[in-house]
Amino acid sequence: MSAGTGGAAAGSRLEEPPAWLREVLRCPATGGRLEDRRDGEGRLVALVAVDADPPLRYPVVDGVPVLLVDEAVAEPAAGAPGA
């Protein structure tokens, strides 16, 4: 990787993608926008394509969204049992 392409120091981990990047990312299955999902400590843990039926949840691993259709998990609808 060439110098100046990152923004993080060499050897450091990306906490999460910057907001500008999350704004342009799209669901690979539907082309729709993705919404952030955070854990109880406020860390970004997933991006969810809410326009999919059911909504598709893509994991964020070490700050990197894994936008592979095979890695997506259906997210229960709000108000559904177990949601």
Image: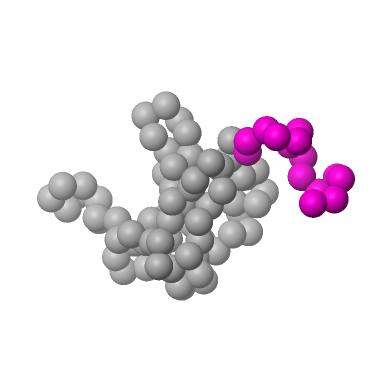
User: Is 80 within the magenta?
Assistant: no
Say which of 80 and 68 sits in front: 68
Residue at the far bottom: name it: 30
Q: Quadrant of residue 63?
A: top right
Q: Is residue 15 above or below residue 81?
A: above
User: Is 7 within the magenta?
Assistant: yes
Q: Residue at x 45, y 72 (%)?
A: 29
Q: Residue at x 53, y 41 (%)?
A: 62
Residue 35 percent coordinates (x, y): 47, 51
Residue 6 percent coordinates (x, y): 77, 45
Q: Residue at x 25, y 56 (%)?
A: 77
- The total of numbered circles placed on residues is 0
Residue 66 percent coordinates (x, y): 50, 56
Residue 52 percent coordinates (x, y): 37, 68
Residue 16 is at least partly visible in this image: yes
Q: Is residue 46 above or below residue 32?
A: above
Q: Is residue 71 above or below residue 39?
A: below
Principal secondary structure, stretch drawn in magenta: loop
Horizontally, is 9 left or right of 82 in the view? Answer: right
Residue 50 is at least partly visible in this image: no
Say which of 11 and 53 sits in front: 11
Magenta segment, which residues?
1-14
Residue at the far left: name it: 81
Picture colour scheme: one colour
Q: Residue at x 43, y 56 (%)?
A: 58
